Image: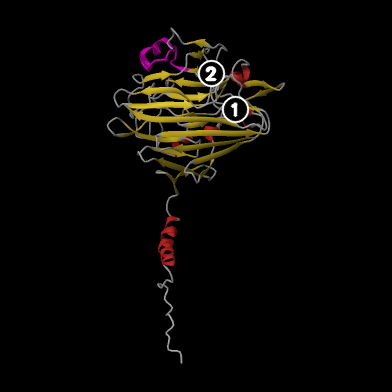
Amino acid sequence: MNNSKSKPHNRFFFNSPLETLFILILPLYLLGGCAETETSNNDMQITEERFGQLADGRYVEIYTLKNEGGIEAKITNYGGIIVSLMTPDSEGNMGNIVLGFDSLDSYLDEHPYFGALIGRYGNRIENGRFELNGEEYTLSVNDGNHHLHGGRQGFDKVLWDSEITEDGSLKLQYVSENGEEGYPGRLTVTATYNLTDDNRLRLEFEATTDQATPVNLTAHSYFNLTADPSNTILDHELKLHADHYTPATESLIPTGEIVSVEGTPFDFTEFTDIGSRIDQVPGGYDHNFVADTSGSRELTLMAEVREPETGRILRVHSTEPGIQFYSGNFLDGTLESGNGVSLEQYSGFCLEPQHFPNSPNEPDFPSTILNPGETYNNVIVYEFGTE
């Protein structure tokens, strides 16, 4: 007779410490599957929430990127829009330094590209026409007689496919079909946002095409470093690493010249109040500056902005040959921010790294033509600090 006792069947009995650890962790893992999506890159986190729904039934998401210093960027896959950007002032007080809304419906209405990704072509193409490889193309016109920021439905008005990557980035993708807004070629675009622990929001574009086509991608956030858009940006101090600019006509089409900023109200080679000479520029600043990159495609510091009251500093780095400085001239009080503040003229400024406006019609400007077999690449970095 065998007097040994068999082990009783008990679901809480484990043969080894490893099994014990597995069983204890499993419920936490399953519970995590029901929570917000979260990925960390060092101490950077991304969460995903529902932002709204389009008329065709598709859902729109909003992603929150946060780093160890508490900087927080909210980005939606509708238009790739930076909805809010919280940064500290010199005393550690957090504030939203970009103009925008708190609901999807407001972004679906007309607005001046608040926070959006811009394409296929950032800025203007004269009369919505260009010639490429012996063929003339006609684009949609949405700025008087001219084509602006990709046309009537540019990349700012489309729902991008989105995913949180393993390295803690937000990856957006959009396919612009042949003929969209008049452009040739099927263009596949990826825009990747990453918020680093050294307080940089990095945006990288990549694009490929199956036909030659102009491509000029950028981002269109309106900044106000006071974090209060009831204040104008005229006292912000701007420095542009650019000693030349491209003069423009009354309709903001470049004349084709590249001239020195020396002795003009466009000279921001040293820190200068934005408002100090704005009355000498009819309509305000909305001009392309030629970056001091010597033709390099390396990431280069292009612009620096200081706000004296809060001590906030913004630096813009890019691989592009130019940067558009826009002083918010067309804001007229008809729109309100998410907290109900009327957005008046000069409530925000834009710094948009780019190739030059109207380049497809200006052979002496850096080319914006992307050919099959090539990969378009553009990096924009916003660096945040205080003094």
Of callouts 2 and 1, which one flags the residue occurring earlier in the amino acid sequence? 1
How busy is the neighbourhood of tag 2: few (under 14 within 10 Å), some, or many (20 plus)? few
Please give left or right for residue 274 compared with residue 291 in the image.
left
What residue sits right under mark 2 in the picture? 294
Estimate how packed mark 1 is, as few (under 14), some (14 to 19) or many (20 or more) residues with alpha carbons within 10 Å.
many
Q: Which quadrant of the view contains residue 181?
A: top right
The amino acid marked with disc number 1 is Val
Of all residues, the one furthest to the left in this rendering is 91
The answer to whether the residue labelled 2 contacts the one labelled 1, judged by CB atoms less than 8 Å apart, is: no
Q: Which residue is mark 1?
A: 215
Does any portion of residue 331 appear in the rendered image?
A: no
Q: Which residues are magenta?
A: 266-286
Q: Is residue 272 depicted above or below 5 in this figure? A: above
Task: Measure the alpha-carbon separation of dots 2 and 1.
Answer: 21 Å
**Side of 218 relative to 133 (left or right):** left
Frontmost residue, 69 versus 219? 69
